[in-house]
Image (spheres, grey):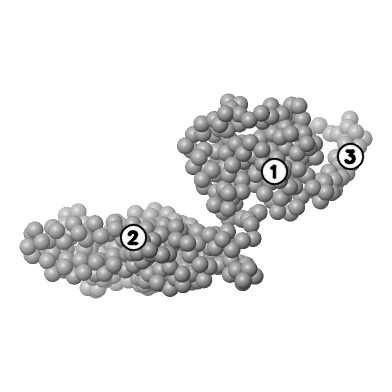
């Protein structure tokens, strides 16, 4: 063999073992962005490659970018992936996680859109005249709200099902952690409902209309000030805890040694999530088009009725610039989720087929 | 005009196979070899991505690791695939070269903008 070098001009690259060079953190991160099966097979080779690159004092930046781009490519098209149950099961599991995480962002985006002034304008219902475009936007808003509810239910109940339907639970302390992580979103949902109830009872809010600026805000009206403050702070904290719970579940699912059949519920979850996100994305486009074509609603029709009403006049300019961005973001989320759901299905089916062949 | 922009880089798989035709090499040696004969710098992601694809198709194979890295060598199937690919390329280059030699001198001047 010509050694690792091959030709005299090349052997300098690695004839004798060199002292491992210190790799920068960004290079280690780029190496770590590859899937586990790849790292097992090519991780050492790539690390050694980078060490030699650093040893020759060559610039590391291009190599790191190349690694990151190729890692994304490997995740999308796993060429050379070993045909083992474990590899395909891990891929399906990662895909399920990828289908879930964008949905968390999607729920936040949908809730932002749902709180938009247009919704409040429709809710006012006091002789507000809507054109055909406005009615399309109103219907689209209802679809978006339903999609948001479906996404929240899928995130909360779906993940709990993924945990509870697992055929082979981790044992001992890992089992308790797994159960806690998978039921945490459900607990968070229950806490949210309870806090909402307390908030209505202890810290009722009322719309405060600013007639001069045409804006509005909500103010606490009645109730005990201390109780109202405590409930409000707890409610805000719970808003942060919710997404954290979802991430805990995703992490727990990644760490748990699941059986292939345990992923069935996750695959269904990711597919439903992709469908719901697609419907929401289409509704969002319809909402944006409808809203921008709705003629301005006179302020007089809005002020003084309904919670948190903004004057419609003058808001359309901001909507015209915002909704294409929100729609584009949502479309990107939908595509990622759809791809992840497809990948999860494929990974699950291949893993199951390989498992059947093994047994 | 920059010919690199008009004609994109050669396929990395072809470069990797051509390099391995000279004997087994590990990733970094392969990159330096390609850089020497093709003036193309392949990154670690591209090199090992190519090797993975070629290994999956049985065109290259990994040898026993030495110093935390696997040398790779061409298989018989890889040599055949490289031979076929190079023959096709050779047909194109020889045709292009002979036709260029025959018509050189009889070519009209390009537009003024193209000269700049």
- Residue B61 image position (x, y, % from top left): 73, 47
Say if labels 3 and 2 share a chain. Answer: no
Q: Quadrant of the C terminus of chain A?
A: bottom right
Near-viewer residue (A168 or B17): A168
- Residue A164 image position (x, y, % from top left): 40, 72
Say if labels 1 and 3 share a chain. Answer: yes
- Residue A338 image position (x, y, % from top left): 52, 64
- Labels 3 and 2 touching (C-beta < 8 A): no
Near-viewer residue (A105 or B97): A105
* Residue linked to disc 3: B94
Task: Give how far apart the Cα atoms at labels 2 and 1 are.
Answer: 45 Å
Q: Along the horizontal axis of the image, is A357 left or right of A335?
A: right
Q: Which mark is residue B64?
A: 1
Q: Quadrant of the N terminus of chain A?
A: top right
Q: Along the horizontal axis of the image, is B16 left or right of A120?
A: right
The chain under label 2 reads A
- Where A278 sits versus A72, above or below? below
- Residue A264 image position (x, y, % from top left): 50, 71
Q: Of circles 3 and 2, which is in front? A: 2
Q: Is residue A40 visible?
A: yes
The chain under label 1 reads B
Q: Is residue A208 visible?
A: no
* Residue linked to disc 2: A245
């Amino acid at each position: 063999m010509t050694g690792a070098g091959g030709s005299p001009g090349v052997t300098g690259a690695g004839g004798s073992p060199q002292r491992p060079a210190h790799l920068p953190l960004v290079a280690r991160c780029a190496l770590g962005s590859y899937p586990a099966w790849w790292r097992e097979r090519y991780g050492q080779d790539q690390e050694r490659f980078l060490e030699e690159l650093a040893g020759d004092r060559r610039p590391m930046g291009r190599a790191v970018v190349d690694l990151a781009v190729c890692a994304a490519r490997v995740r999308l098209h796993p060429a050379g992936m070993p045909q083992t149950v474990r590899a395909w099961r891990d891929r399906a599991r990662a895909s399920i996680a990828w289908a879930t995480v964008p949905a968390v962002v999607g729920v936040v985006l949908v809730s932002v859109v749902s709180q938009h002034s247009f919704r409040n304008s429709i809710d006012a219902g006091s002789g507000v005249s809507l054109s055909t475009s406005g009615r399309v936007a109103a219907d689209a808003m209802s679809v978006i709200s339903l999609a948001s509810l479906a996404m929240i239910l899928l995130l909360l109940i779906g993940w709990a099902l993924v945990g509870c339907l697992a055929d082979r639970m981790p044992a001992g302390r890992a089992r308790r952690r797994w159960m806690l992580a998978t039921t945490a979103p459900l607990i968070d949902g229950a806490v949210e409902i309870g806090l909402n109830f307390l908030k209505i009872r202890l810290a009722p809010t009322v719309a405060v209309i600013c007639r001069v600026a045409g804006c509005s805000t909500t103010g606490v009206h009645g109730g005990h000030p201390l109780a109202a403050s405590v409930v409000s702070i707890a409610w805000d904290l719970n808003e942060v805890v919710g997404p954290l719970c979802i991430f805990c579940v995703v992490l727990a699912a990644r760490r748990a040694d699941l059986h292939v059949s345990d992923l069935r519920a996750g695959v269904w979850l990711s597919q439903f999530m992709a469908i719901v996100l697609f419907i929401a994305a289409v509704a969002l486009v319809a909402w944006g088009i409808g809203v921008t074509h709705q003629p301005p609603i006179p302020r007089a029709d809005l002020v003084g009725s309904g919670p948190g009403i903004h004057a419609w006049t003058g808001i359309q300019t901001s909507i015209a610039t915002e909704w294409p961005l929100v729609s584009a973001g949502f479309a990107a989320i939908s595509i990622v989720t759809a791809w992840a759901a497809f990948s999860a299905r494929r990974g699950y089916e291949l893993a199951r087929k390989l498992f059947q062949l093994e047994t | 005009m920059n010919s690199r922009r008009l004609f994109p880089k050669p396929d990395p798989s072809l470069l990797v196979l051509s390099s391995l035709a000279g004997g087994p090499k590990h990733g970094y040696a392969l990159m330096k070899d390609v850089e020497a004969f093709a003036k193309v710098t392949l990154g670690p992601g591209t090199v090992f991505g190519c090797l993975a694809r070629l290994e999956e198709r049985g065109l290259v194979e990994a040898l026993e690791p030495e110093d935390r890295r696997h040398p790779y060598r061409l298989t018989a199937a890889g040599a055949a695939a490289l031979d076929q690919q190079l023959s096709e390329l050779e047909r194109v280059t020889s045709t292009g070269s002979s036709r260029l030699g025959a018509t050189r001198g009889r070519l009209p001047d390009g537009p003024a903008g193209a000269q700049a």
